Image (spheres, grey):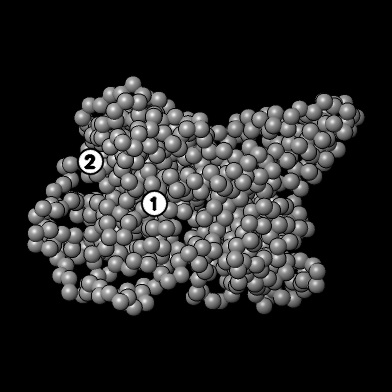
């Protein structure tokens, strides 16, 4: 039993029972369900049934979960209907057709509801059609969409700005119980997608502001070419994956489209009949329409998430779904020694012979005083182009385009963690990519307030890298692979949950907290973790490859965005190059281009001549990958690049200061 008090001071008693208590069975006889009919399972005062079963349907075979966004998870755009309907009625009323306002409202509400869940442009196309039917000269549907969005912003603008500033909790604009349900579904290992008729850039930003983007393997919204994406197309793509059938699809939504598409595919559907903004009772108007297109269950919110999970999946709580990408991770066994034993004709090193020592016995080259406070002076750095890069980061944030920071581990050792964390918290950076050493420095700093050992000192005694506590990262990496999480994602989650004294300096923990991915791109044998007896190469590959796919997905939003490469001579340019190839390949199929974006390299290497031109192979500078890859080749079709030579301890704070202006 749950007591909820609404903002209007109205008291609701919510029962999370799915079946009627026996004492009510006789009284409920008149409403007991007959074949083909639906009836509330229980009612409590003003609150409609928490879980209404229209037709019992098991989701036990589920592998993929599809969520609608607005009204189903997010309440940021609550009131959109009350904006769109009057705008359209006003447009039609001006044509002098003789219809009453009520008649026009009926016409408008009918096609708005029918198209809810599709890209907003389809509702505007329908409006243009109604204008033409009445003899009017219709505007371009994009003009109607622009008019609508301007009016909508006057309603939702303050909400978005408050979330951007961190002035309110993200949960304020989530349907009650949504986060707990997302956690529960993610815990089961389902592949999850978020789809909406809202413009994709806005969808991504708002999902990030609500800190729910991290739950989803894919986020899909309206594109400029509205024919290239729809929920139907997404469902078809899901079903085209090997071994995935319609019965393995579970859909949640408050709109016509997502419920109809999932149901037609043979999946199980939950109609989320939210009565916004409180979402405490069922919206009867939504309920009737959701039932009409095939909803199996009706709920007003996710407050009774445990009971909903029980209803959908039965009493079994053990066992997890195999992710769609599971075939990529076959062989990621976690029993040491090596998975599959050693069948090689060659002998391998016996790691059981290694002696690990505690970190307390290690002398660290870098201590806490190395890390700058935000108000602490940094070494001076000026460059006329730096303000341009800062301005483009700001513009990319406004557009919801990618803002990617790739960096070598030396950047963390430069003492600028607080600047990077602040950039993450303010949204100047939306994705961080590092190598394996970067993860180690971040972890050690959070745990002991120091990092970096002397190679010269410890390699002589065979102690280099063999420190007991640092090996904990291998356990977390195995956990990431087992749970289908990204490597950086699980490290950030784990550090955030730890009691480590200096976790406030962890970039990984901060990024996880704000919902920005940190991806770790490892090379086997590169890092001290790979020396340890508990290192599982299969798990390492699985988790880091997932990170690569997360990174490639971020690169898909690089049009109009910015990619920064700080001090990564190999990992940064090589990982970026392959991810961009994948992103451009997929974009071309969708009729899009990824060509107009900004890249900037921050490094110590001198570049002779014009850095925007590729040097000949006879020049040693040709083999400096950031030059030819990031500054020249990948921006040749409409992008622009910049090069800044200087110490990271100076250049990164200088960029941060310009963003603060």
As helix, strand or loop, the secondary structure at mark 2 comes to loop
Q: Which mark is residue 234?
A: none
Q: Mark 2 packing: few (<14 Cα in 10 Å), some, or many (20+)? A: some
The first of marks 1 and 2 along the sequence is 2
The quadrant where residue 422 appears? top left
Which residue sits furthest top?
A: 384
Give the quadrant of the C terminus.
top left
As helix, strand or loop, the secondary structure at mark 1 comes to strand
Residue linked to disc 2: 414
Which residue sits furthest right?
A: 98
Q: Viewed as shown, does residue 123 lie left or right of 6?
A: right
Which residue sits furthest front?
A: 618
Residue at left offset 63%, top offset 64%: 249
The quadrant where residue 21 appears? bottom right
Q: Viewed as shown, does residue 32 lie left or right of 269?
A: right
**Residue sitting nearer the eye, 445 or 598:** 598
Residue at left offset 36%, top offset 63%: 540
Q: Position of residue 192 (x, y in %)?
A: 55, 58
Q: Position of residue 266 (x, y in %)?
A: 70, 66
Q: Which mark is residue 519?
A: 1
Q: Position of residue 230 (x, y in %)?
A: 67, 48
Residue at left offset 64%, top offset 62%: 239
Would residue 28 be visible to someone looking at this image? yes
**Residue sitting nearer the eye, 499 or 517:** 517
Q: Position of residue 278 (x, y in %)?
A: 60, 49
Q: Mark 1 packing: few (<14 Cα in 10 Å), some, or many (20+)? A: many
Q: Viewed as shown, does residue 510 lie left or right of 189?
A: left
Counting every numbered tag in the picture gives: 2
The quadrant where residue 529 appears? bottom left
Residue at left offset 75%, top offset 43%: 112
Would residue 426 be visible to someone looking at this image? no
């Amino acid at each position: 039993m749950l007591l909820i008090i609404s903002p209007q001071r109205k008291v609701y008693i919510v029962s999370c029972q799915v079946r009627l208590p026996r004492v009510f069975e006789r009284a409920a006889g008149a409403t007991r369900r007959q074949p083909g009919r639906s009836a509330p399972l229980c009612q409590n005062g003003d609150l409609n049934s928490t879980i209404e079963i229209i037709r019992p349907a098991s989701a036990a075979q589920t592998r993929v979960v599809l969520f609608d966004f607005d009204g189903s998870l997010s309440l940021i755009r609550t009131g959109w209907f009350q904006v769109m309907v009057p705008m359209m009625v006003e447009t039609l009323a001006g044509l002098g057709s003789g219809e009453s306002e009520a008649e026009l409202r009926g016409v408008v509400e009918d096609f708005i509801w029918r198209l809810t869940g599709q890209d907003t442009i389809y509702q505007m196309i329908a409006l243009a059609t109604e204008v033409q039917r009445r003899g009017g000269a219709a505007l371009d549907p994009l003009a109607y969409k622009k008019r609508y969005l301007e009016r909508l912003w006057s309603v939702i603008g303050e909400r978005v700005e408050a979330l951007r500033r961190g002035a309110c909790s993200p949960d304020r604009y989530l349907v009650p119980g949504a986060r707990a349900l997302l956690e529960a579904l993610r815990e089961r290992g389902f592949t999850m997608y978020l789809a909406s008729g809202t413009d994709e850039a806005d969808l991504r930003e708002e999902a990030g502001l609500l800190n729910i983007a991290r739950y989803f393997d894919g986020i899909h919204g309206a594109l400029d070419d509205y024919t290239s994406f729809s929920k139907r197309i997404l469902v078809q793509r899901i079903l085209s994956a090997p071994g995935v059938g319609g019965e393995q699809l579970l859909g949640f939504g408050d709109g016509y489209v997502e419920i109809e598409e999932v149901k037609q595919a043979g999946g199980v559907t939950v109609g989320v009949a939210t009565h916004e903004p409180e979402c405490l009772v069922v919206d009867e108007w939504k309920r009737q329409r959701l039932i009409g297109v095939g909803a199996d269950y009706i709920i007003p919110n996710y407050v009774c998430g445990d009971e909903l999970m029980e209803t959908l999946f039965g009493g079994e709580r053990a066992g997890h779904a195999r992710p769609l990408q599971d075939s990529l991770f076959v062989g990621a066994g976690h029993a040491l020694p090596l998975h599959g034993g050693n069948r090689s004709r060659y002998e391998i090193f016996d790691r059981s012979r290694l002696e690990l020592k505690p970190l307390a016995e290690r002398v660290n080259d870098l201590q806490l005083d190395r890390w700058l406070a935000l108000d602490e002076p940094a070494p001076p750095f000026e460059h006329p182009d730096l303000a341009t890069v800062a301005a483009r980061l700001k513009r990319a944030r406004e557009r919801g385009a990618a803002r990617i920071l790739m960096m070598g581990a030396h950047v963390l050792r430069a003492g600028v963690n607080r600047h990077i964390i602040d950039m993450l918290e303010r949204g100047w950076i939306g994705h961080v990519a590092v190598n394996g050493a970067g993860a180690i420095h971040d972890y050690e700093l959070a745990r002991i307030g120091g990092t970096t050992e002397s190679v010269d000192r410890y390699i002589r005694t065979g102690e280099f890298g063999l420190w007991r506590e640092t090996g904990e990262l291998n356990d977390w990496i195995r956990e990431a692979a087992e749970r289908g999480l990204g490597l950086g994602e699980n490290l950030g989650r784990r550090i955030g949950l730890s009691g480590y004294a200096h976790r406030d300096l962890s970039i990984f923990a901060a990024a996880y907290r704000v919902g920005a991915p940190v991806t770790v791109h490892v090379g086997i044998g590169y890092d001290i973790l790979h020396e340890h007896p508990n290192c599982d190469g299969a798990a390492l590959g699985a988790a880091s490859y997932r990170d690569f796919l997360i990174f490639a997905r971020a690169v898909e939003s690089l049009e109009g965005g910015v990619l920064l490469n700080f001090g990564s001579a190999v990992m940064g340019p090589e990982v970026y190059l392959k991810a961009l190839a994948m992103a451009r390949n997929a974009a071309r199929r969708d009729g899009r281009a990824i060509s107009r974006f900004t890249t900037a390299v921050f490094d110590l290497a001198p570049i002779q001549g014009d850095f925007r031109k590729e040097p000949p192979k006879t020049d040693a500078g040709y083999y400096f990958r950031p030059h030819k890859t990031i500054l020249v080749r990948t921006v040749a079709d409409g992008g622009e690049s910049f090069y800044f030579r200087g110490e990271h301890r100076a250049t990164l704070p200088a960029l941060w200061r310009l963003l603060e202006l």
